[in-house]
Image: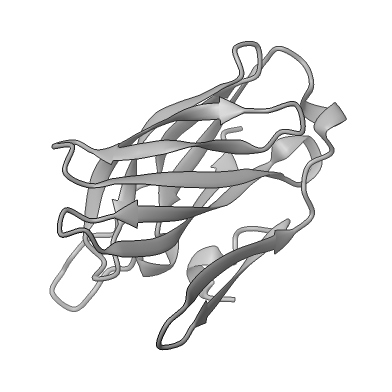
Amino acid sequence: MPSELSKYSFFALAEYIDAKTHRVYVIGSPTNPAEVNQPVILTYFALVGEIKNKADASGKTPATAQLLTIDLAKNTVSGTIPVVDADGKASDFNLSGTIDGLKHVSGTLKSADGTVTGEFHGRPYGAGGKELAGVVAIKRSDGTYWYSTLTGALKQ
């Protein structure tokens, strides 16, 4: 597993790419829905594209994970977090969505200027929802798609 993701204990990421197909997978130990069934708020330090989030020789500073909130009383997901693209450039995106009874999260994301949009699907992993992971499909302003992952750690 790349060192950027080694801090996660309850999931791993996999990717398959060929000339016609690009698939992103999250494999792990999902949180038992009964463990996060109280009307509480779970707050994660999260970002999209963490595997591309690196410093480089030019002095680029990696993006800092920002807060993503899951409100179990309202069944909502919301936050503004960085999305790191395939070139390692980070931009803030607004995420909004829902969490269902099985604790699957899903929703949409949109760049600050509204020209880039996408969808995310994921779930909490580990005891008590300690980690968050999911797949993301982003439609660029030119109409092409890019696929990535949403990752996060529960704020302690």
Rendered residue at 18%/37% (across/down): 114
Looking at the picture, how far across and down is residue 120, in whole percent?
Answer: 48, 45
* Residue toward you, 136 or 79: 136
Query: Which of the colour schemes (rainbow, by chain, secondary structure, one colour) is used?
Result: one colour
Instruction: Identify the residue at image location x=77%, y=33%.
Output: 102
Where does the image place residue 75, in percent across and percent down from the top left?
Answer: 61, 19
- Closer-to-camera residue (62/129): 129
Can you give x and y, in whole percent of width and height, for residue 55 in the image? 27, 68
Most distant residue in the bottom direction: 19
**In the rendered image, which quarter contains the C terminus?**
top right
Q: The N terminus is located in which quarter?
A: bottom right
Q: Look at the picture and state if 40 lies above or below 149.
A: above
Q: Residue at x 47, y 78 (%)?
A: 21
Total numbered circles: 0
**Taking 80 as reference, is 61 above or below it?**
below
Q: Residue at x 52, y 51 (%)?
A: 151
Q: In the image, is 9 to the left or to the right of 34?
A: left
Q: Going by the image, does 117 lie left or right of 2? A: left
Please indicate whether residue 85 sits to the left or right of residue 13 in the image. Answer: left
Q: Is residue 127 above or below residue 43?
A: below
Where residue 84 sits, quadrant-wise, is bottom left
